[in-house]
């Protein structure tokens, strides 16, 4: 598992600089079986040169670790937490209960219920404890939302996001042009 996680982590940013600076985003998940989905969030953050860490933290199997991760994240410089889990997906909500940081929940399709169980477990938070929930298995959007949140106080990052959106628009226009020809 450690080897798989290490290979997920950016050894260096895309502009060639070593990623030795403290992580701004924490990507956590309930099990290594969530990794094939959650790697999409790590890839987005790497694309935007946002330093991130990836950890397995289970609400049910390692509850003490979940507590210490959530309680220490802010003082370690983490600004946004992306939490993915499947089934009885309690991790994002429990972490949101323990930290004032914004928590983005990724419902992972992990059971016979096609991910609906994960979605409802994450999205149906009680008033007062918000989790920003993305679509089932859509860790890409979790990464993008984290970039947008950080972009509020980081104009360079916000400009990169605007460029990313322009690029997506251009892709659609090029496809449309091809269809018309
Ligand atoms: C959840 O249970 C995890 O987030 C995972 O999605 C699901 C299944 O975990 P494994 O049994 O594959 O470890 O806690």
Image (cartoon, helix red, strand yellow):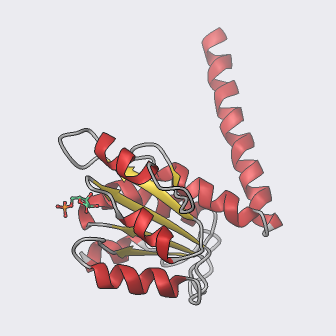
Say which residue appears at 61% left-offset and 85% top-offset.
Answer: 77
Say which residue appears at 58% left-offset and 83% top-offset.
Answer: 74
Say which residue appears at 50% left-offset and 88% top-offset.
Answer: 72
User: Which is nearer the eye, 9 or 140?
Assistant: 140
Quadrant field for ligand 1: bottom left
Q: Is residue 90 above or below residue 67?
A: above
Picture quadrant of residue 170: top right
Residue with the most extreme top position? 180
* Image location of residue 76, percent across then percent down: 56, 89
* Image location of residue 69, percent across then percent down: 43, 83
Q: Is residue 178 left or right of residue 52?
A: right
* Image location of residue 141, percent across then percent down: 54, 49
Say which residue appears at 32% left-offset and 57% top-offset.
Answer: 89
Residue 114 visible? The answer is: yes
The quadrant of the picture occupied by the C terminus is: top right
User: Which is nearer the eye, 174 or 116?
Assistant: 116
Q: Is residue 33 left or right of residue 43?
A: left
Residue 10 visible? The answer is: no
The quadrant of the picture occupied by the N terminus is: bottom left
Q: Is residue 169 above or below residue 82?
A: above
Q: Is residue 159 left or right of residue 108?
A: right
* Image location of residue 117, percent across then percent down: 29, 45
Give the number of marks: 0
Picture quadrant of residue 21: bottom right
Residue with the most extreme right position? 155
Residue with the most extreme front position? 127
């Amino acid at each position: 598992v450690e080897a798989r996680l290490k290979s997920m982590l950016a050894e260096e940013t895309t502009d060639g600089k070593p990623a030795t600076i403290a992580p701004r985003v924490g990507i956590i998940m309930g099990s290594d079986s969530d990794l094939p989905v959650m790697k999409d969030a790590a890839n987005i953050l790497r694309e935007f040169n946002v330093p991130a860490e990836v950890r397995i933290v289970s609400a049910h199997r390692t509850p003490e670790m979940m507590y210490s991760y959530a309680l220490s994240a802010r003082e370690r410089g983490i600004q946004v937490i992306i939490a993915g889990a499947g089934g009885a997906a309690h991790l994002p909500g429990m972490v949101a209960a323990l930290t004032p940081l914004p928590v983005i929940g990724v419902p992972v399709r992990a059971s016979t219920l096609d991910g609906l169980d994960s979605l409802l477990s994450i999205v149906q938070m009680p008033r007062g404890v918000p989790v920003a929930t993305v679509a089932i298995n859509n860790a890409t959007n979790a990464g993008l939302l984290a970039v947008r949140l950080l972009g509020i106080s980081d104009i360079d990052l916000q400009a990169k996001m605007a460029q990313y959106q322009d690029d997506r628009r251009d892709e659609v226009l090029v496809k449309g042009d091809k269809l018309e020809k």
